[in-house]
Amino acid sequence: MLGFVGLSFLLLIQAGNAQEPDAGSAQQKAPTVADQAEKRNSARDLRRLQDDEFLVETAYLQDESDLFHKLTFERTGRHSWSAVFKEELTIGNENRNFVFSIPAHLVGTGTQKSRGFGDAEIEFSYGLYGNGSSRITISPGIGLSLPTGSVRKELGSGGAGLSVKLPVSVAITEWFTSNSIVEFCHTRSARNTDGQSANTSEYAIGQSFVWFAKPKLNFLVETVWERQQEVTGHGSTVNSHSFLVSPAVRWAYEFKGGLTVSPGVAIPIGLGPSRGENNILFYIAFSHPIRKRHDETK
């Protein structure tokens, strides 16, 4: 991972030290503008999967002409499975993004087995700066979690939560991208299995580096640190921390009509407070146009 980060840093320095073309006549400037536009289009084609993520959310929002569905499966431990369905669409234009997700869990075996839906979540993200073709993209968001999961089965928090996030994506080069995110979630009157309640606050910091090896094949390394709180009594909580490093790969298949199917596999590895945790995560995403794109109507 350190080698990957170092390589990305060296590439960033090299790109920053590249000489700017000399100012000249209008005839000299015109090809430069055209070349830059062509380069941006080429980079956007290479990074066509840049808005797909595993543990670290990116700042890239879904294209306004596309509808996005995603199903994620994760195994944590020997007998714990979860699946999350995610529906993503734009509102008006690509700067306003709406996401709905709901998880389902299967925990334990035999008489200790619990299964059911977890807490659903609704999120809204706004493209504050940049877009999918920009060097820097910033898309803050706000979310609401709904207490749809069973507290008795330990599948839900028991209270409504409000979350805020700030993802920032940087195109280091045409081939490498950095994604950073800070998240905060406050849950009011969260409950435990004994019916005791307390307010909880959780934080998360994530960082990922993506190598766009090919337009339909990407390799990633993600790191996530989290601080969670668990209700231990009326008005009292206890803190816990986790730290994961996750190598991952994602690829895509394209079909007639604009349908794109994107599978991905990640292996989150616990370090520090999460030492000994070895999980596996798999997702499959479907993206298809709901109307003609702007460039197809011209």
Image (spheres, grey):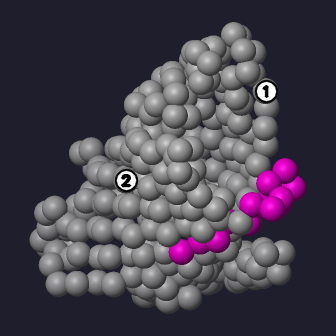
Label 2 neighbour load within 10 Å: few <14, some 14-19, many 20+: some
The answer to whether residue 75 is above or below residue 91 is below
Tell me if residue 23 can be seen: no
Q: Quadrant of the C terminus?
A: bottom left
Q: Is residue 101 left or right of residue 229?
A: left
Q: Badge 1 is on which residue?
A: 238
Location of residue 247 by image quarter: bottom right
Percent across and percent down for residue 53 are 51, 63
What residue sits 16% from the left and 75% below the top? 296
9 or 21, which lies in front?
Answer: 9
Name the element at disc 2: strand
Q: Is residue 205 magenta?
A: no
Location of residue 263 by image quarter: bottom left
Circle 1: residue type? Val
Q: Badge 2 is on which residue?
A: 85
Span of residues in magenta: 265-277
Q: Is residue 142 left or right of residue 246?
A: left
Circle 2: residue type? Phe
Percent across and percent down for residue 31 are 43, 87
